[in-house]
Amino acid sequence: DVDQGPVITASCARQMAHGVANLMGSDLALSVTGVGGPDPVEDQPTGTVFIAVRCADSDRVEEHHFAGDVEDVLHAATLTALRMLLDDAEQHATG
């Protein structure tokens, strides 16, 4: 259920996280969209990444700009996304 148009946006990341939560029937969902490189995409420079976490009835989206080659960007995006997911899961668990 992602709107047509650019997919490297905060809105797209949020819509993907909502879609995953709805599809899986879960309280917690994660999505990542961005440009690993080597070239810009949709007028977004290499290293631009949007990460969304859906937790219960709230969500959080962050925009990041990671440096390096494709592998560096993917590594940084993965670690950041997992940290965000863990932080939100811990906050949800402690209420």
Image: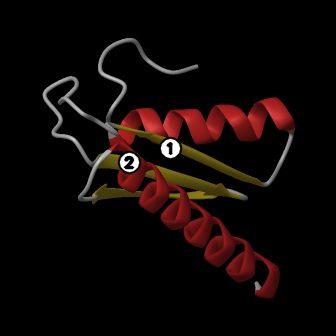
Residue 8: assigned label: none
- Answer whether labels 1 and 2 touch (C-beta < 8 Å): yes
Q: Distance of mark 1 from mark 2, alpha carbons?
A: 6 Å
Q: Which part of the image, by quadrant, shows the N terminus?
A: top right
Tell me where residue 7 sits by quadrant.
top left
Tell me where residue 8 sits by quadrant.
top left
Judging depth in this view, the residue of 79 and 13 nearest the camera is 79
Tell me where residue 18 sits by quadrant.
top right
Packing grade of label 2 (10 A; few <14, some 14-19, many >=20) is: many
Packing grade of label 1 (10 A; few <14, some 14-19, many >=20) is: many
Q: Which part of the image, by quadrant, shows the C terminus?
A: bottom right
**Amino acid marked by disc 2:** Phe
Q: Is residue 89 left or right of residue 54?
A: right
Residue found at x 45% / y 56%: 77
Q: Is residue 72 left or right of residue 59?
A: left
Label 2: state its secondary structure. Answer: strand
Residue found at x 26% / y 48%: 47
- Going from N to C along the chain, the mark reached first, 1 or 2, is 1
Question: Percent from the top left, x then y, of residue 68?
Answer: 26, 55
Q: Residue furthest bottom?
A: 94
- The image shows residue 83, relative to residue 12, as above or below, that is below
**Amino acid marked by disc 1:** Val
Question: Percent from the top left, x then y, of residue 37?
Answer: 28, 35
- The image shows residue 58, relative to residue 31, as above or below, that is below
Label 1: state its secondary structure. Answer: strand
Question: Percent from the top left, x then y, of residue 76?
Answer: 43, 61
Q: Residue furthest top?
A: 4
Residue 32: assigned label: 1
Write down the residue under mark 2: 50
Count of residue discs: 2
Residue found at x 68% / y 81%: 91
Q: Is residue 93 left or right of residue 17?
A: right
